[in-house]
Amino acid sequence: DAGVIQSPRHEVTEMGQEVTLRCKPISGHNSLFWYRQTMMRGLELLIYFNNNVPIDDSGMPEDRFSAKMPNASFSTLKIQPSEPRDSAVYFCASSESNQPQHFGDGTRLSIL
Amino acid sequence: GEDVEQSLFLSVREGDSSVINCTYTDSSSTYLYWYKQEPGAGLQLLTYIFSNMDMKQDQRLTVLLNKKDKHLSLRIADTQTGDSAIYFCAESTGSSNTGKLIFGQGTTLQVKP
């Protein structure tokens, strides 16, 4: 079975640029989660969706971050404008009702 | 607020047992999880336990839950070099298994040959 698919795997860009991270959840899963992982702060939940609807975005750091889920098989996390402190590994995870979350391999983002 | 604490580092010899400990604060947590992260990879679900259970065993893995003390442990029997990774403890918040997870900071397990 295909797991959670994230793209790109690596992204290097200059500060001020727009960054778009993409996620395809496991087919049939109805919940999708975006996390950020850094050495300093560990794993942080940014936002999660249930049936394509954002449920909790309290972890989104600031207005530069936005996330969408236009359909059940695709989600994006956008940072505009990007800053060096946004450098981190961003994970997407999905789950179906009453089942554990499954993670993608992450996008390693470096903002210069 | 909710918090999950783990020790940061554990070193064992190949063939020994490893025990990774975790404490949590949310007494209403319904599920508790162990995830494994290898370098450059995402988090892989190892096992999870429902809060009304004391123990769960799955091959070389044994999870013990002390709900009174809010303490969770993961025992890996016959630890192998391939078990070297970061292990995350996580608790669910709320009654659903699809809600928010609170992760510990991760325990780096080093297995020496």
Image (cartoon, rainbow, N blue to C red):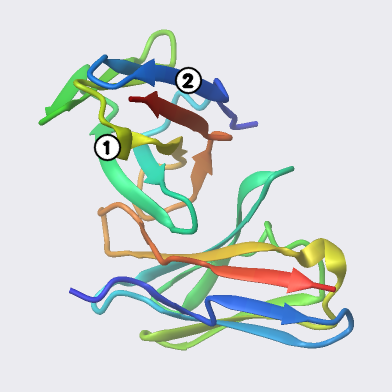
x, y percentage for residue B11? 45, 19
Q: Is residue A31 above or below residue B11?
A: below
Which image quadrant: the C terminus of chain B? top left
Q: Quadrant of residue B34?
A: top left
x, y percentage for residue A103? 40, 61
Q: Nearer the viewer, mark 2 or mark 1?
A: 2
| Residue that appears at 81% across and 76% down | A64
B41 and B104: which is toward the camera: B41
Other-residue count near label 1 (Cα within 10 Å), few / some / many at <14 / 14–19 / ≥20? some
x, y percentage for residue B107? 50, 29
The type of residue carrying mark 2 is Leu
Residue A8 seen in the figure = yes
| Residue that appears at 25% across and 39% down | B47
- Provide the chain ID for the residue under circle 2: B
| Mark 2 residue element | strand
Other-residue count near label 2 (Cα within 10 Å), few / some / many at <14 / 14–19 / ≥20? some
A4 and B25: which is toward the camera: A4
User: Total marks drawn?
Assistant: 2
Q: Residue furthest bottom?
A: A70
Q: Which residue is mark 2?
A: B10
Q: Earlier in the sequence, mark 2 or mark 1?
A: 2
Q: Quadrant of residue B65?
A: top left
Q: Is residue B98 above or below residue A32?
A: above
Q: Is residue A17 above or below residue B93?
A: below
Q: Which residue is mark 1?
A: B48
| Residue that appears at 26% across and 53% down | A98
Q: Is residue A14 left or right of residue B62?
A: right
Q: Is residue A17 left or right of residue B33?
A: right
Q: Residue furthest left?
A: B59
- Provide the chain ID for the residue under circle 1: B
| Mark 1 residue element | strand
